[in-house]
Amino acid sequence: MDFKNKVVIITGASSGIGKACAEEFAKRGANLVLGARQYVTLCEITADLETRYGIRAIAVQADVSKEEDCEVLIKNALVTFNKIDILVNNAGLSMRALFNDLDLSVLKNLMDVNFWGTVYCTKYALPEILETQGSVIGVSSIAGYRGLPGRTGYSASKFAMNGFMESLRTELLKTGVHVMVACPGFTASNIRVTALAKDGASHGETSMEEGKMMSAEEVATRIVDGIAARKRTLVMTGQGKLTVWINKLLPALADKLVFNHFTKEKNALIK
């Protein structure tokens, strides 16, 4: 696919995978609509990308947990560019707490951002994407295929996203619209630093060895390549692919392997 002059909306674009996707699309000539809560940071990113790559980009302050913000994001894209080719539902929150200790507001927050944010943006963008026979992308996780300890709300929200995207793909099978679920596996980004603790506060530190993970830039390249190839599902790591298959074929073994893996993280929640 030639991305030159395609119009791409990316949520959660102020850092991590979203920011890296913005850079990768800009390199390939796409025009960008970047949404996130951090408006000043977004403005800096759009100005930088326009200067370096000669594309057009706009920043829209948006909290995807709010339906009205998602509607405004899509309207800004149409007012500025008059079309939408690709929607990348990337905005997301993580968590780290055992369910028994958890304030239920944390689960609601995760569902509002990770699941409902995807639903809202897709709902408002879909009529335009049908016109262009474009792409709807959900940036999910291996946690959307295999529940992870200490991440009940995160896993539930990603399972919900995966089910939504699968249903949507089937509904749109004869329309020419491309629907892709991207599952990066563990990625070096700030998502674990901003992950919610049992009371809803940010952890402020990572529980894993970030240096051994995929970079956000590598994930972004694979996502954009996947869109170009109109792939259905993108599970990016060998560990992720193995986890998905073991969970399907030997679920009891998967329980033990996942349990053992998470006993080794820093300040492990399970022992």
Image (spheres, rainbow, N blue to C red):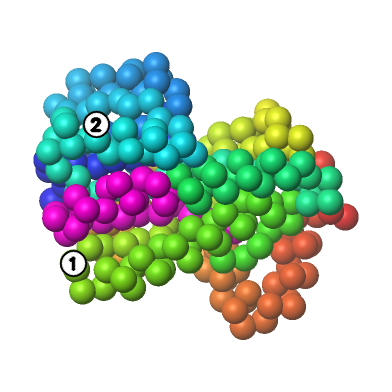
- Residue 112 visible in image: yes
The numbered mark, 1 or 2, whose residue comes first in the sequence reads 2
Q: Which disc, if any, is residue 76?
A: 2
Q: Residue at x 22, y 53 (%)?
A: 127
Q: Is residue 56 left or right of residue 183?
A: left
| Residue 200 in the image, given as x and y percentages of width and height | 70, 34
Name the residue type under label 1.
Gly
Q: Residue at x 88, y 55 (%)?
A: 271
Above or below, comparing residue 40 to residue 119 in the picture:
above
Label 1 element class: loop
Label 2 element class: helix
Q: Is residue 44 left or right of residue 82?
A: right
The chief SS type of the magenta part is: helix
Mark 1, residue position: 176
| Residue 255 in the image, given as x and y percentages of width and height | 74, 70
Residue found farthest to the right: 271
- Residue 268 visible in image: no
Q: How many numbered discs, if any?
A: 2
Residue 129 lies in magenta, yes or no? Answer: yes
Above or below, comparing residue 105 to residue 160 in the picture:
above
